[in-house]
Amino acid sequence: MADYKWPPMDKRRVMGKRIARLDGPMKSSGRAKYPSDMNRSDLLFGALLTSPHAHAKVTGIDLTAAKAIKGVTAIRVISGPGTEIQWAGTEVAAVSAVTEEIARDAVKAIKVTYEVLPHLVKEDNLAKVGARAKAAGEQVTGDPDKAFAEADAKTAGDYGIPVITHCCLEPHGSVVAWGKDKIDFWPSTQAVSTVGGDLAKMLELPATQVHVDCQYMGGGFGAKFPADRWGAEAARLSKESGGRPVKMFLDRATELTIAGVRPSHFAKIKVAGKKDGTITGWQSESWATGGIGGGGMAPLPYVFTNIPNRRMNHTQVSLNTGPARAWRAPNHPQASFLTCAAITDFADAIKMDPYEVFFKNAAVSARPETYRKQLAKAAELIDWKKKYTHGAQKTGTLRRGLGIGIATWGGAGHASKCKITIHPDGTVEVELGSQDIGTATRTCITQVAAETLGLPMSGVKVKLGDNSYPPSGPSGGSTTIGGVSSSTRKAAVNALEKLFEKVAPSLGVTPDQLEADDSRVVVKGNPAKAMSWKQACQKMGPTPISEMGENEPRTAAREGLNTQGASGIQMAEVEVDIETGVVRIIEVVAVQDCGLVVNPKTAESQVAGAMIMSVCSALMEERITDQTTGRVLNADMEFYKLAGLPDVGKLTVHMDITPEHDARGIIGLGEPCAIGGIAAIANAAANALGVRVPMVPLTPERVLAALANRRNA
Amino acid sequence: MSSSKEKPKDRQPKSAFSRRSWLQGAGVSGSVLTTGLLAEEAQAQTAANVMSGEVEITLDINGKKRSVKVEPRVTLLDALRNRLDMTGAKRVCDRGTCGACTVIVGGKVMYGCSVLAVDAVGKPIQTIEGLAPEGQLHPVSKAFVNHDAQQCGYCTPGFIMATKGFLDRNPNPTTEQIDKALSGNLCRCGTYMGMKAAVLEAAKEIKNG
C-alpha cells in the first residue's frame, strides 16, 4: 500500500507555511461572484410573505390584488388555509416578478387572514413557561448530597446566555433555474455535495437533475446546510415562470428571524469543594430553548467532566420562535460559559486565584497535561500572575479584571473524495465537491497537493463548489480540513505513483526509487538524476493520469492523516466603568491546539475571528423577543449588535504548533476556537467588578444592576 | 459605535422624503415599522407623495456614463446590483448600519443602500469595480490580502471602499483614526485582527506610489 503519511514537519515546503489565501484577490477586488451576485439573463426576483404572528392558524389567503400587478410572473402559497404557524416569520407565500420592487409590492398585496393563537416567546424565567417545559431527566454520578454536606466551601450561582442568531452577512437564499431537463442551483451553502440532493428530495426529482454551483459564500457558521423551503419555492417559482432563473434571498429581518439561532442556556449551578481548590461536587438545574422543538443541551459540567459527585437536571423549553440550527460548536460555548463562570465564582469564594483552581481541576478533564500547558502559556501571554488581583481588592471607577474560558472539541475529518488529474502538459487539477466558507479551504487543499506533488502553489489548480466533483462532506463541526486534506494527500500520492511508473524506465530505476521535489522528479538519494516535472509529464503520452483519494472517517484515525480532540484556553482582560457599566476589551488571548496546522496564517485568522465572535456574544449579541407581539424586536443590524473594529481590543493568537501535536495529524479548528472566549470575558468582568453579572451579553444595564444588587444585599 | 459616514439624512435630499426605508414604500416590512421613528414617518407621509413607474437616468460610475431605468424608490445599491450587474457592493443590512454596500459618491464615503439612485445623478460614483483594472489590485485590496483581513469576504468590498475613501482624506492615519473611520462597517467572520495593519500598509504603499 502506498505511503500516505505526512512528510516530516521540518521537510515541508508548502504545508505549514504562512501563505496568503488564494481567493483573497478575488474577494478584495469585488470580483468574486457569490450566489447572491448571480445575475443570470432573464433573471426574476423572488420575495417571501411571512407570518406576523408567532402562533396562528391561516384561515384565508386572497391573491387577487397581487396577481393583478404587472410584472408578477408567479405566486405560490406555502402555508395555505388550515396551516398552523408556530413562529413569527414562517413562510406563507412567495412571489416572483421582473423586478425586486414589484415582487415586494406583490407580497404586500397578498391578503392573509389568521386565527391568532396563544404564544410563548420568552424562556428566561422558567417559572413562567408552564406546560412548555419538558424535563430531560436527572443524571447522578457519585454521591452529590454527601459531597455537598462534607465540603469546605459551597457556592451557588445563576447564569444565563440568550439565544443569538447566525447573522450571516450574505443572507440565506439562492438563484435557481428550473430548466427542461435540469435545475441549475446557485445556493449560498456550506454543503455543496449534499444540498442538491436535498433540493431534489423537496421537489421530488431525481438527484441527478440538480446541478449545484457555489464558488463563494458569505458566511454560514452552521446555518447553511439545507436547501431550505425558500430554495424549493424559488425553484417552483422558476418552473411556473417558464424556467426563468429566480433570485430569492431573505431580507435582513427574515434572516434574523427564521434562518437559524443558537439555543439559549440558563442554569442554577452549585459547586462544592475543598479549601485547596479541589472541586468535589457539582449540581446544576439548567434549561434552554432553540425554538418550537425545545433546546440544545449543553454538556455540563464542561471539560471538568470527572468531578466525582454530580447531579444534573435539564429542561427543554419549547417556544414559538424560529428554530435552532447548528451554530459554531453547538452547545459548547454555552457549556463553557456556564461551567467556567461557576468554577470562577467558587475560586473567588475561597479567595483563590481562579488560574490555580482551573490548573488544579484540570485533573478531572480528559487531557490534564494539555490544558495545564495551555493555561500556563495563556497566563504568560496575558501576564496573569503580575496582573491578577481578587475582585474585592479593586478600587476606582475604571476597574480591570482577568478571566479564563476553556474548550474541547472533536474535529476529525469528514468523508471526502478527491480526484487529481495530471495532464501531459504538466498542469494539475484537483477536484472536490467541497466548499470554502471563508476558512481558506481552497488554499489549504492547494498547499497539500503542491506539497505532495513537489510543485509550487501555482502548479496546482483546485476546483471546488460544484456537485459534479467527487463528494465531500458538508463544512460543519470542524470536519472539513481533516477530510479534504487527507483525501487530497491520498489522491496526490496515488497520481504520483502512476506518474513514476511512466517515468522510471527513462531514468533507469524502479518507480519506488523516485520522489517529486522542487518541480522535478528525482531519484532518491541521487539528486543529479532527475527530470523536470514538465518532462516527466510528457512521458505519460496523450492520456492524463487521474487518480482518486478518499478519507473514510472510520479508518482515518488508524491511518493518522487526521484525528480528533482539540483543546483550547482563552483568557481575557477587560476594563469596566462602574459608573456607566460599559465593559471594554483590553485583550483576549487564545492558546489553541489543532494538531498539524496546514496554514498558520489563515488558522490564526480563524481563531481571531472566533474570538471576535465571542466578544460579540459576551458584550452585545442577543435576540430580543417581545411576549406581547410574539415578534423579534431587533431583527435588524442596528439593534442586533455586532462588534466593530474599535470594540475588540488586542487579540493574541497562539497556535500550539509543536512536534507532539503535529504528530497527531490534522484536527479541525473552526469550532474549538469559538468556545472559550465568552467565558473568559464574562469572568474577567466578574473579576473587575467583584460581583458576577449573571447574564451575558454584559450590557451596561446588566452590569449596573449587578452592582446595585451587591449594594442592596 | 459611531460612524464617520455621511448618511443621506444629514444632507438635503432632492426628493421629498428623508428616509429611504419609507421611500421604498411597499418594501418596508411590518416588523421594521414597529420601531417608533419609522412608524411616525410613515404616518407623516401620504400615499399621494409616492411616485411610481421607471425613469431613465444616467449615472457617472467609475468615470463612465451608464444609463439605467429605475423607479424613484430604487436605491443606488440596488441599481448597481440588480440593474448594472455591479455586484461588488453587497446588500446586507439594507438599512445603513453595516457598510457592506459602501461606495464613494461625490468624493464622500456613503452607504449605497441609503442613497437613492435618482439622487446620485450628476455625482461621480466610485465602486470597487473601478478601483483597479482587471488582473490588477488596488493597494488597499492588496494590503487586505497580505494581512488576511478577510474570510468569507462578503464585507470586504465595503471595507476596502471605506478604507479607500478614508485614505483619500487622511493619507497619514493613526490607528485610532483607523478604528473610527472603519467603525461604520461590520464583519461577521471577525477579520479585524489584520485590518489595522492592512490600512497602515496601504497608506504607505499609496504614498510611495
Image (tube, coloured by chain):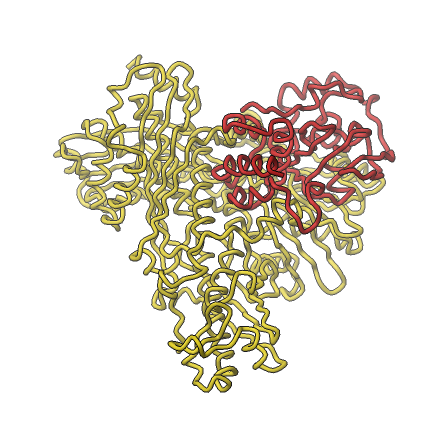
Chain colours: A yellow, B red
The answer, for residue A630, to whether it is visible in the render is no
Q: Check the picture and name the quadrant holding the N terminus of chain A.
A: bottom left
Question: Closest to the observer: A622 or B72?
Answer: B72
Q: Check the picture and name the quadrant holding the C terminus of chain A.
A: top left
Q: Looking at the picture, how far across and down is residue A387, in whole percent?
A: 27, 28
Residue located 71% across and 63% down the image: A182
Compared with A427, A239 (above or below) is above
Q: Looking at the picture, how far across and down is residue A548, in whole percent?
A: 51, 72
Q: Looking at the picture, how far across and down is residue B180, in whole percent?
A: 54, 26
Question: Closest to the observer: A170 or A489?
Answer: A489
The answer, for residue A442, to whether it is visible in the render is yes
Q: Quadrant of residue A561?
A: bottom left
Question: Closest to the observer: A156 or A214?
Answer: A214
Residue located 73% across and 46% down the image: A76
| Numbered-mark total | 0
Q: Looking at the picture, how far across and down is residue A466, in whole percent?
A: 61, 60
Compared with A592, A432 (above or below) is below
Q: Quadrant of residue A343?
A: top left
Query: In the rendered view, does A694 fall on the left or right side of B101?
Result: left
